[in-house]
Amino acid sequence: LGRTGQLSTLVIYGGAALGNRTQDEANAALDMALAAGVNHIDVAPTYGKAEALMGPWLEQHRDKFFLGCKTEQRGRDEAWKALETSLKLLHTDKLDLHQLHAVTSMDELDQATGKGGALEVLIEAREQGLTQWLGITGHGWEAPSVFSEALERFDFDTVMFPIFPGAYANADYRRDAETLLQKCVQRDVGVMIIKSVAKEAWADRPRSYDTWYEPYAMQEKINQGVRFALSQPGVTAIPAAGDVRLLPLVLQAAENFTPMPQDEQEALVEQARDLQPFFA
């Protein structure tokens, strides 16, 4: 994972999948990830009950995982309180990676990185030994360009943003994403990719999964999405989709991973051009 030296498994356990689950369901999903060899967890306060459900289980397995958490707060005081709450709920005294979360615009970046902003909390947390590494995450059409600017303002250790064929069908997004990836490779910034199994917006269709976008749910299509994301330059890993029922399929896709040739990537991008985008 870039300069962190962390050898993350291809699949990160994404805590968003636990947002509205029971403790037994959470334990079963985390046990499945552990049994598959997953060694990296990503969670955030905004993921419903995820932190509270993960904490009791994680307490028994903390030494087996690189733990990434986030803050969606933009001000210093709020971000510090959120960090203290996350540590308590997760039953741990420190994180491995703390990240500015859901930074989707230059205005939000200004708030988080300005005087009295949440970035000050991340820096102080590192100084106090509450985390070792600092990152930034987000989605939306502006994410790659916002993160390129973020790396000019502060030397973040990691970034997390979406890559999937439907996003690369947007020429501007693809250009900005490829520019960001190149910068990350040059600066040894760790890259994690979200939304790898995303298909399109739910629109008026009933939601059959806990994801806010419609995911692919067949093994072949999930294999393609995982291969596409992991085949981009500098990418280390993908958080599993935000529904526990998709975890076995994502794990299987990672188990069978081989880099995707460029012509196959381009074919997937072309096929995705008619899909309904879900970024505002």
Image (cartoon, helix red, strand yellow):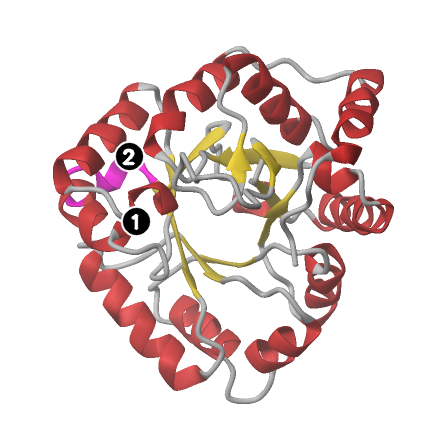
- Above or below residue 63? Residue 120 is below
Q: Residue at x 62, y 64 (%)?
A: 104
**Residue 64: assigned label:** 2
Disc 2 to disc 1, how far (Cα)? 22 Å
**Residue 19: assigned label:** 1
Q: Residue at x 82, y 27 (%)?
A: 270
Q: Amino acid at mark 1?
A: Gly
The residue closer to the viewer here, 276 or 149, is: 276
- Above or below residue 257? Residue 180 is below
Q: Residues within 10 Å of mark 1 (few under 14, many from 20)?
A: many
Q: Amino acid at mark 2?
A: Lys
Q: Residue at x 46, y 29 (%)?
A: 11
Q: Is residue 18 magenta?
A: no
Q: Nearer the viewer, mark 2 or mark 1?
A: 1
Highlighted range, magenta: 59-65
Q: Residue furthest front?
A: 204
Residue 270 placement, left or right of 74: right
